Image (spheres, rainbow, N blue to C red):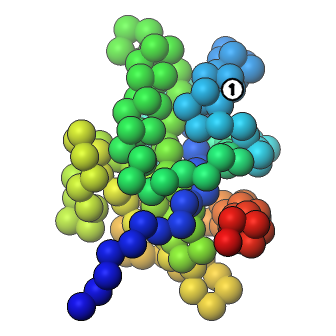
Amino acid sequence: MSTPHIPLPARALLSVLSARWDRFWPDLVPKIENILGRIDYESDLIPFTQTRYYDRELGNPIARRILSFARPLAMDGLADIKLATNCLEEEWSTSGQRLFNLDPGYLTQERLVLATGKNFSHRVYLSHGIWADLTLIFHKGEWFDLPWTFPDYSTAEIKVHLTRIREMYKNDLKHMR
């Protein structure tokens, strides 16, 4: 028989997509930090060229910024964070068009999980209409794609950032235990 236990907290992550960074970025940061805690990792802007899915709504050219946060995240809090980031997207929207797309998730030593409001065969329901998407797994020193991994998360550039954040998380775990 397995004995249930609460897992160690994860490292909160947020991916931000937009084509109009100058219109919101400095003002959005404190609102993000109010939800997730102090940002301790911020990537440079990464061109988002793998799909044109967001072009109509967000404009072009779209760039991504990956953030991670110093405050540990209880994994069962992911749905609430997704709902809070959805509120930020709505708050900054005009005429039903988002200015940015916020994709929260978490990283552990073994995986990257993103939150979504869309069901699919490989996604696991969390709560409040939010699903968990197992996006990447980490095994034997590298990130592995899954059949459903988004093309942008399959890139070496994104995986370099995730590896840096994973190293920060591993260091945090040493101090937690």
In this rendering, the answer to whether 105 lies above or below 166 is above
- For the N terminus, the image quarter is bottom left
Q: Position of residue 24 (x, y in %)?
A: 65, 17
Instruction: Tell me which residue sits at (65%, 46%) in the image.
Output: 71
The residue pinned by badge 1 equals 29
Instruction: Tell me which residue sits at (61%, 22%) in the image.
Output: 31
Question: Which amino acid, mark 1?
Answer: Val
Q: Position of residue 159 (x, y in %)?
A: 66, 67
Looking at the rendering, which quadrant does residue 32 occupy?
top right
Q: In front: 105, or 92? A: 105
Looking at the rendering, which quadrant does residue 95 occupy?
top left
Horizontally, residue 110 falls left or right of residue 29, namely: left
Looking at the rendering, which quadrant does residue 19 occupy?
top right
> Visible in this render: residue 153?
no
> Visible in this render: residue 12?
yes
Q: In front: 109, or 66? A: 109
In this rendering, the answer to whether 144 lies above or below 46 is below
Instruction: Tell me which residue sits at (59%, 38%) in the image.
Output: 36
- For the C terminus, the image quarter is bottom right
Q: Position of residue 160 (x, y in %)?
A: 73, 66
Horizontally, residue 110 falls left or right of residue 43, namely: left
How many discs mark residues in the rendered view? 1
In this rendering, the answer to whether 45 lies above or below 161 is above
Q: Position of residue 153 (x, y in %)?
A: 55, 61
Outermost residue toward the top in this view = 95
In this rendering, the answer to whether 163 lies above or below 40 is below
Horizontally, residue 131 falls left or right of residue 5, namely: left
Q: In front: 92, or 2? A: 2
